[in-house]
Amino acid sequence: MSESAPSRSITFLLLGDPVGKQRARYSGRSRRFYTPAKTRRYEVHISYAFIGVNRGRFSVFQPARHVHVHCVFRNGTHPDCDNVLKSVLDGLQGRAYQNDKSVTGSTEMSFDPQQPRIEVTVT
């Protein structure tokens, strides 16, 4: 019996309100730009969620990828889906691919007041 080929896509779910990439902030004291803590935490959660489902199927050295993000919001005000995609792409950098410049991305949006989340598919 031959072993089946590895899956060409990985899908994972991150529960909670989607978080859009926030603008870099400037610290006059250290004279540097930094990413706000809320964005950094969300990117780390994305990275760990990917690691949990990857199981060695994807290598960062493989060529271009496509990342699809389905943003599910509670309702009312919410971040722009493109900014959520930026958070996801930055969270996956170094895990699913070396640099997000070789990645294409797409987003879609829906509403579910009971269970906000993002559904991410990497192919």
Image (tube, rainbow, N blue to C red):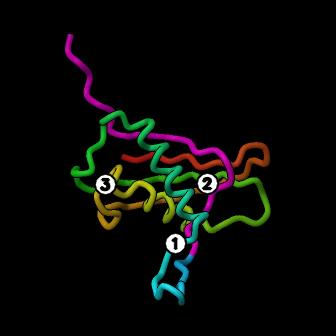
Q: Secondary structure at mark 2?
A: strand
Q: Secondary structure at mark 1?
A: loop
- x, y percentage for residue 22? 58, 72
On the rendered image, what quadrant is the N terminus found in?
top left
Task: Give the prevailing secondary structure in the magenta stretch.
Answer: loop
Q: Looking at the rendered structure, which numbered label has been put on residue 71?
A: 2
Which residue sits at x=23%, y=18%?
3
Cα distance between the residues tagged 1 and 3: 21 Å
Specify the amino acid type for callout 3.
Tyr
- The crowd level at tag 1 (other Cα within 10 Å; few <14, some 14-19, many 20+) is few
- x, y percentage for residue 64? 27, 56
Vertical comparison of 55 with 121: above or below = above
Highlighted range, magenta: 1-22
Which residue sits at x=37%, y=58%?
93
Discs 1, 2 touching: Cβ within 8 Å: no
Q: Looking at the rendered structure, which numbered label has been put on residue 35?
A: 1
Q: Is residue 62 located in the magenta-colored stretch of the structure?
A: no
Closer to the N terminus: mark 1 or mark 2?
A: 1
